[in-house]
Image: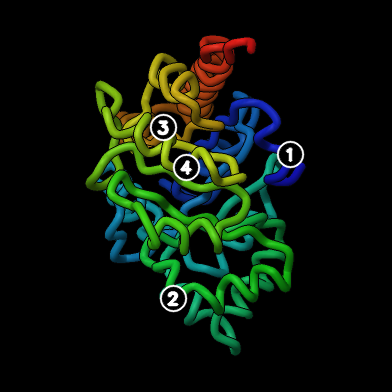
């Protein structure tokens, strides 16, 4: 399956930091998400200065780095996974640029070799992404950009000219993190994106099946969930729970979120007949 196929129905797109809290446990957690219904999985390649992330993901990054995660170890992690869904690498541009002998190209080539389908790079503005876009095109990978509630006009057009795979719709201002309620900005942002022919996946703050239902009912093509899943990993790690028990909890929440996304599609208003 490719990213083109993943949004044939409302997609559930979970995020985990690869290697959190250790290599082998993290493999089980990612595979549990696939069993629970993930259509795409975003894998975080940890960076020491994750400026777009809230405390939950920052702590996951620390656990992963403490466990020995590196770019090369990340590629080994991807190769070791037994999943049949597209994998997207979410990381920061410094790691992409510094890897290997050819800036950017070495990283993208290696990612393509191990089966990565695309990238999310939160600190890379669309205006400075021409090299990464060109190399992604060379190796057939997608480049996903984040659109904030404040992104409008010419800047929005520049982003959407360069995006492929899907656009990551930021539901609220600020950093990542699970929330108790949805942002009022979501519907407005989706409306601004209505004229662009690329799937829209909403993230930042989604933590329950009901949230997923509301977002998809508002017009999203998918939901992105990270912090709510990482909370399960963190709590299990702190309480010394067996890896299998933590994986079961992740699979259960994944099923809830996927079911919520599908329910959201059923609740969308039907177009009026003319």
* Residue 134 visible from this viewpoint: yes
N-terminal-most mark, 2 or 4: 2
For the residues labelled 3 and 2, say whether their Cβ atoms are less than 8 Å apart: no
Quadrant of the snapshot with the N terminus = top right
Q: Residue at x 31, y 55 (%)?
A: 62
| 222 over 193 or under it: above or below | above
For marks 3 and 2, the one nearer the N-term is 2
Q: CA distance from mark 1 to mark 2?
A: 28 Å
Q: What residue is pinned by disc 4?
A: 193
Q: Nearer the viewer, residue 259 or 155?
A: 155
Above or below, 166 relative to 239: below
In front of the other: 109 or 162:
162
Do residues under tags 1 and 3 come within 8 Å of each other at their CB atoms?
A: no
- Gap between marks 2 and 4 measured at Cα: 22 Å
Q: Residue shown at 50%/30% (left/top)?
A: 220
- Residue under label 1: 5
The answer for how far apart the CA atoms under marks 4 and 3 are is 27 Å
| Within-10-Å neighbours for mark 3: few <14, some 14–19, many 20+ | many
Res 155 quadrant in image: bottom left
Residue 67 pos. (x, y %): 41, 57
- Which of pointers 1 and 4 lies earlier in the amino acid sequence? 1
| Tags 1 and 4 touching, CB below 8 Å | no
* Residue 162, position as x, y percentages in the image: 55, 63
Which residue is disc 3 drawn over? 229
């Amino acid at each position: 399956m490719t990213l083109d196929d993943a949004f044939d129905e409302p997609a559930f797109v979970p995020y985990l930091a690869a290697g959190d809290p250790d290599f082998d446990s993290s493999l089980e957690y990612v595979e549990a998400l696939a069993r629970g219904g993930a259509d795409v999985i975003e894998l975080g390649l940890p960076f020491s200065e994750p400026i777009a992330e809230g405390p939950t993901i920052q702590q996951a990054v620390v656990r992963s780095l403490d466990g020995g995660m590196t770019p090369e170890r990340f590629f080994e992690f991807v190769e070791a996974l037994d999943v049949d869904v597209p994998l997207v690498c979410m990381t920061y541009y410094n790691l992409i640029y510094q890897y290997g002998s050819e800036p950017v190209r070495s990283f993208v080539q290696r990612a393509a070799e191990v089966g990565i389908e695309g990238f999310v790079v939160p600190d890379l503005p669309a205006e400075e992404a021409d090299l990464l876009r060109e190399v992604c095109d060379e190796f057939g990978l997608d480049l996903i950009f984040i659109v904030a509630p404040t992104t409008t006009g010419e800047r929005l057009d520049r982003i959407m000219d360069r995006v492929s795979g899907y656009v990551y719709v930021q539901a609220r201002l600020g950093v990542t993190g699970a929330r108790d309620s949805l942002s009022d900005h979501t519907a407005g942002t989706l409306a601004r994106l209505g004229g662009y022919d690329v799937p829209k996946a909403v993230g930042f703050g989604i933590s329950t099946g009901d949230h997923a239902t509301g977002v998809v009912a508002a017009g999203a093509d998918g939901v992105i969930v990270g912090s709510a899943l990482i909370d399960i990993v963190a709590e299990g790690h702190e309480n010394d729970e067996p890896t299998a028990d933590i994986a079961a909890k992740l699979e259960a929440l994944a099923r809830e979120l996927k079911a919520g996304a599908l329910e959201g599609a059923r609740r969308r208003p039907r177009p009026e007949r003319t």
